[in-house]
Amino acid sequence: MLAYEKLLLENKAWAAEKVSDDPGYFERLAKLQTPEFLWIGCSDSRVPANEITGTQPGEIFVHRNVANMVVNTDVNLLAVLDYAVTQLKVRHVIVCGHYGCGGIKAAATKTDFKPVLNMWLRNIKDVYRFHREELDAITDEEKRADRLVELNVREQVYNLAKTTIIQRTWQREERPHLHGWVYGLKDGIINPVFEMTAGTHIDDIYEYQNL
Ligand SMILES: [Zn+2]
């Protein structure tokens, strides 16, 4: 059997099991989606949002990219954010990074990964520069990379707060709350590292009037 054929076979078994446990399962999900959470995570195959949080289909709206970035020119991310916040009315947005992140480690090197990856990783290099003093003081390479993972998650939460999508909703509905988490590949535990409740003030230059 070809590798991808196994996926299709497993899918049939999964669907059959769901229906046998709960005959109305798919009918119900097909009609309505009301997730409470938007998850912005890393594309890394070892960090599946639903599995590590014990949630079911329908509970988390998910966006994933290399190193869980919130880049203000990324139309894909912004469309997901706008839809989740404005239409689905999620109450929480979670940026979840993970220790041992390859994207973060790559950004901390001087390796030329060629144009497209360089463009993406540049955003992480900026985070390094903002926190150079703290990071340079950490001698252990792995610990330094893990701290960069935490600081990067915090910056991405800030990046969410800089958008008019978030600011407009904060002003009108006092949601969503923003969370920065880091998942441990070695122990499976999520470490909450940063939080921003709805309405938090950020640097004045990023705050819009007449939203
Ligand atoms: Zn990663």
Image (tube, helix red, strand yellow):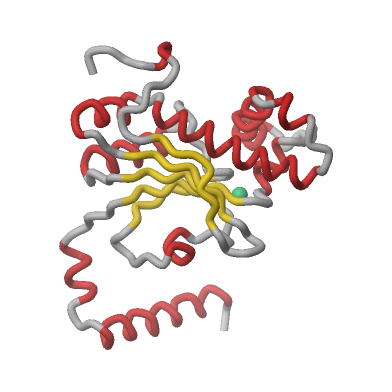
Q: Left or right: where does residue 56 sit relative to residue 3?
A: left
Q: Left or right: where does residue 163 sit relative to residue 46?
A: left
Residue at the (37%, 81%) spot, across then down: 12
Residue at the (33%, 45%) spot, across then down: 92
Q: Left or right: where does residue 57 sit relative to residue 50?
A: left
Q: Which quadrant holds residue 44?
A: bottom right
Where residue 201 sits in the image (x, y, percent)?
37, 22
Q: Which quadrant holds residue 89?
A: top left
Residue positioned most to the bottom? 20
| Vertical placement of residue 204 versus 158, above or below | above
| Vertical placement of residue 199 versus 103, above or below | above
Q: Which quadrant holds residue 33?
A: bottom left
Where residue 6 sits in the image (x, y, percent)?
51, 80
Where residue 125 sits in the image (x, y, percent)?
67, 29
**Label total for image:** 0
Q: In which quarter of the image is the N terminus?
A: bottom right
Residue at the (74%, 40%) spot, across then down: 144
Residue positioned most to the right? 139
Residue at the (31%, 81%) spot, across then down: 18
Q: Left or right: where does residue 65 sit relative to residue 130?
A: left
Q: Quadrant of the C terminus?
A: top left
* 142 vs 118, nearest the viewer: 142
